[in-house]
Amino acid sequence: MSEKIPIANSINYVHVEALNERTYKNLVPYTSDMKTTKTFLFAAIDMILRYITELNEHDSPVIKNGLRTPAEYRKMFTFEIDDQGSDLYDILANCERILETTVRSGHPRFINQLSQGVDTISLVGEMITSTINANMFTYEVAPVFNLMEESVLTHMRDCCGWPKQGPLSKNGDGVLAPGGALSNLYAVLAAKHYAFPQIKKGGIQNGLRPAMVISKHCHYSMKRAAAILSIGTDQVYEVDPDESGRVTAENIEEKILYCQSLGLTVFFVAITAGTTVFGAFDPIEEVSVICRKYNVWLHVDGAWGGSTLLSPKTKHLLQGIDKADSFTWNPHKLMSIHLQCSAILIRHLNVLQEANQMCAGYLFQPDKHYETSLDTGDKTIQCGRHVDILKLWLGWKARGHLGYAEHVEGLVENAKFFYEALLKREPYFRMVMKPPFINVCFWYVPSSLQHYDQTTLEYKQRLDKVAPKIKERMMNSGTMMIGYQRLDDYPNFFRAIISNPATTKGDIVAMIDTIHELGHDL
Ligand SMILES: *Cc1c(COP(=O)(O)O)cnc(C)c1O
C-alpha cells in the first residue's frame, strides 16, 4: 500500500473528508447518483481556482522549492499502479500535489517557451471540449465543431488575402493540427503530393530526387519532415541568413540552381515569419517571386509570428503572404490559446484530401446523407482528432478583432520595454541584436568578464558558460524561467519572449534584477 498524501490546503466549498473511502464506483458513470460526483468535481475546481490565484501573485515562485531531481519526484508520488485502486480522497490529494509541484507555465515570470499563460476563456473551452469528448473526424459526431473550424480557418486564410476558388468558392484548405511541427509536416506532405502525386502509391522511385531549400534558421521540424517523408535530411539544403537573421531571395535562388546542377528537383522552399530564436521575418514577397519562377511550393512557417496578421500595426511583417502556398500559424503561441492549437493553411483546394485520403469505409461512407466535405478526418494524418477549435473560437469571439490587435500590440510594447530596460543596464547586459519582434536576445556579462576583449576566443568561451550557470541557479531557486541557447557563432545567450498578457513591466524589471542577482558573482 502506498503512503497516503494528505490534502494540505483547506478546500472552501466542499467536505473532502466525505470522499474518504469512496471510490470511482461512487462516481458517474458507475452510478447515477450525482452527490459524490458533484463533491469531487467541486473540490477539483476549487483546487484549480486556488492554483490560478497563486499564479497571479507575481512574486510567488514559478516552481515551488525549485526543480527537483527525478528521484525526489518519484518519492513524492507513487507512480506505480496498485492492484487495489485508490479512493477519491487520494486521487484529489494527488491532483493537489501535482498543482503544488508543477512548473507553472502560466506564471507571469515563466518566459521559457513560446506558449505561456493560463487564459481563462481557453480553459473553459478545454473543459467543455473535454466534457463533450467529441472527435473531429466526422461531421456526424462533431457537427458544430467542424463548422466552427471551417469558419475560423476561412477567416485565418482571409487574413492571408487568399482568393476564393472552385465550385464552393473556398479560399483554400487547412486543418487544425497538434502543433507547429505537425503543421510543417503537413506542408511538406502537401507540397510533395502536389509535385509528385505518384509517390503516394509507388514511393520514391525511377531516379526521382526531390529536394527542399530552407533557411538555416527554420524550425528543426522542417528537416524532421524530410526524414519522416523519406526525402532524407541530406536533400534539405540550407541557406544562411544575414546578420539580421533573414534570408535573401538571391540566396534562395542560388541554392535552387545549385540543387538543379546536382540533378535534384526542388519542390519546396520554407522560410519563417518570426524565427524561433531571433524572431526574424524572412522577405516573403521577394522569395515568392523566385518560387514562382522555378515553380516551387512556398511554405511560410508563422508558428510564432503568424499572429502579427492580427494587428494593422504589425501585419506588414507578413507582406507577400498572399502568394504563399502554405502557412503555419500557432494560436497556442502568440494568441494565448491553450495547447494544443496550430493551424496549417493551404492555398490549394483538395491537395490535403488527395494526399492523405484512404477512404476507410467504416468512417467515411461515400453515400452519407450530408455534405461529406465536412468529414475532415480523411484529409489528416490522424484518425481521431481532438477538438482544438472551441477554445480558439471562444477566445476570438471574446476579444474580437480589436481585442487581438491590442493583445499583439501590448506584447510588442512589452518587448520594447524589455529591450530598453536592458540597454540601461549595460555593461552587465549586452544585446545580441536589436529585437526584430518580441524575441529579446541578450547576454549577461558578470563583472569578471567586463574587462575582456570581446573579440577573443577566451571571452566567448567564458561567456558561453554564464547563461547555463545562471539557468541552473534559477531552476534551483524556482523564481523565474527563461530559455538560453547558442546560435551560429554566438555563445550561449538568453532569449526573453513574452506572450503572456499577465506579464507586466514590473515583472520585466524583477526578472532583469533576478538574472543580475543570480549571475553577478560568476
Ligand atoms: C514553435 C515553433 C514551431 C513548432 O511548433 P510546436 O507547436 O511546438 O510544434 C515551428 N516553427 C516555429 C517557427 C516555431 O517557433
Image (spheres, rainbow, N blue to C red):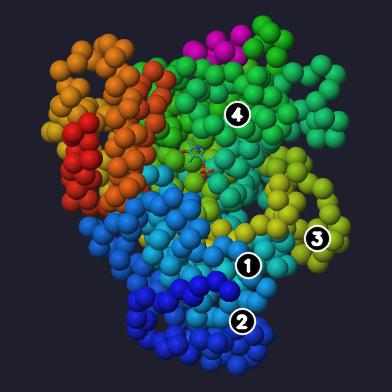
Q: Label 1: state its secondary structure.
A: loop
The Cα atoms of the two marked residues, 4 and 2, are separated by 46 Å
Q: Where does the magenta region start and end? A: 249-258
Please identify, in this view, whether the residue under mark 4 or under mark 1 is nearer the observer.
Answer: 1
Given contact means CB atoms under 8 Å apart, are the residues at marks 3 and 1 in contact? no
Q: Which mark is residue 24?
A: 2
Residue at (49, 75) in percent of width and height? 4
**Residue 243 point in image, percent of width and height:** 36, 18
Q: Which mark is residue 363?
A: 3
- Image position of 6 (left or right of 389): left
Q: Secondary structure at mark 4?
A: helix
Distance from Cα at disc 2 to Cα at disc 3: 33 Å
Q: In whole angstroms, how far apart are the C-alphas of marks 1 and 2?
A: 15 Å
Q: Amino acid under label 3?
A: Leu
Q: Per the image, is 257 magenta?
A: yes
The residue at the point 14 percent across, 33 percent down is 425
Inspect the image, locate mark 1, and give the three-letter code of the amino acid beneath it. Answer: Ile
Whichever of labels 3 and 1 marks the residue nearer the N terminus, that label is 1
